[in-house]
């Protein structure tokens, strides 16, 4: 099967940002992109980086001691015209399969990390269907607990979709005291597609 989508390697999954970006306050927490919009958590320690190009990417980061939390969003274009007519689940399965292969080829086989507890599901949040993939990437420098959520505007005939990625990067022998995954899911439920 031909490659369907432009891959941005999920924003360098295992690499943190060199800078966290601009602090998110009530004055700048409304994120509006050409194909989606959402309200970021304000005044809670989050920082934002935006790239307003074809990928319409936004990265929210929050550092709590040695733990880095990130919420990443981007628009992904379906390049193959025959795949645009396919149901969302077919495109989602292909995308998740490709992401898994990339992680195995570029991470696992190169000894960068081990991939554990990978699960692909279909989840409903509110009235929205998400195609998800959760996993752990375990390296000598720590573990990244991650969740990929794909949101399609329609059940079929999509020329693009939203890729959302949540991660908690934890150093070795450190126990996670909190999680922002519920906040991430609430943000996704309120996301507006255009």
Image: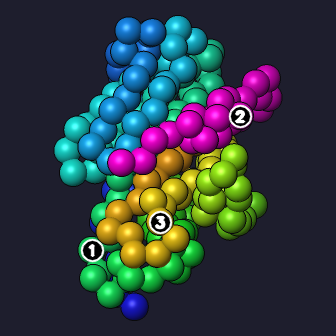
In terms of secondary structure, where does tag 3 sit?
loop
Question: In terms of sequence position, does the residue under pointer 3 or pointer 1 come before the other?
Answer: 1
Estimate the spatial distance between the alpha carbons at disc 2 and disc 3, rounded to whole Å.
Answer: 24 Å
* Residue 155 x %, y %: 52, 71
Q: Which residue was labeled with disc 1?
A: 79
Q: Residue at x 48, y 61 (%)?
A: 152
Check residue 134 in the rendering and tell me which mark sits there, or answer none.
none
Q: Which residues are magenta?
A: 167-194
Question: In terms of sequence position, does the residue under pointer 2 or pointer 3 come before the other?
Answer: 3
Which quadrant of the figure has residue 114? Answer: bottom right
Is 123 placed above or below 190 here? below
Check residue 182 in the rendering and tell me which mark sits there, or answer none.
2
Give the residue furthest to the bottom.
1
Check residue 154 in the rendering and tell me which mark sits there, or answer none.
3
Which quadrant of the figure has residue 67? Answer: top right
* Residue 136 x %, y %: 68, 52
Q: Nearer the viewer, mark 2 or mark 3?
A: 3
Q: Give the camera-side residue of 184 and 189.
A: 189
* Residue 16 x %, y %: 45, 34
Is 101 placed above or below 152 here? below
């Amino acid at each position: 099967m031909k490659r369907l989508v432009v891959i941005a390697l999920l924003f360098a999954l295992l690499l943190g940002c060199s800078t966290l970006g601009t602090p998110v306050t009530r004055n700048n927490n409304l994120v509006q992109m050409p194909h989606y919009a959402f309200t970021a958590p304000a005044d809670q320690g989050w920082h934002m980086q935006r790239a307003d190009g074809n990928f319409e990417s936004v990265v929210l980061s929050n550092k709590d001691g040695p733990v880095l939390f990130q919420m990443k969003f981007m628009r992904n274009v379906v390049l193959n015209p025959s795949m645009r007519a396919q149901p969302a689940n077919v495109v989602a399965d292909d995308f998740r399969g490709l992401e898994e292969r990339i992680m195995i080829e570029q991470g696992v086989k190169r000894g960068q990390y081990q991939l554990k507890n990978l699960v692909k599901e279909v989840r409903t949040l509110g009235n929205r269907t998400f195609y998800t993939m959760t996993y752990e990437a375990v390296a000598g420098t720590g573990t990244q607990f991650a969740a990929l959520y794909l949101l399609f505007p329609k059940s079929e005939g999509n020329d693009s979709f939203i890729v959302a990625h949540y991660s908690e990067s934890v150093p070795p022998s450190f126990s996670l005291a909190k999680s922002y995954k519920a906040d991430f899911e609430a943000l996704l439920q309120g996301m507006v597609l255009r």
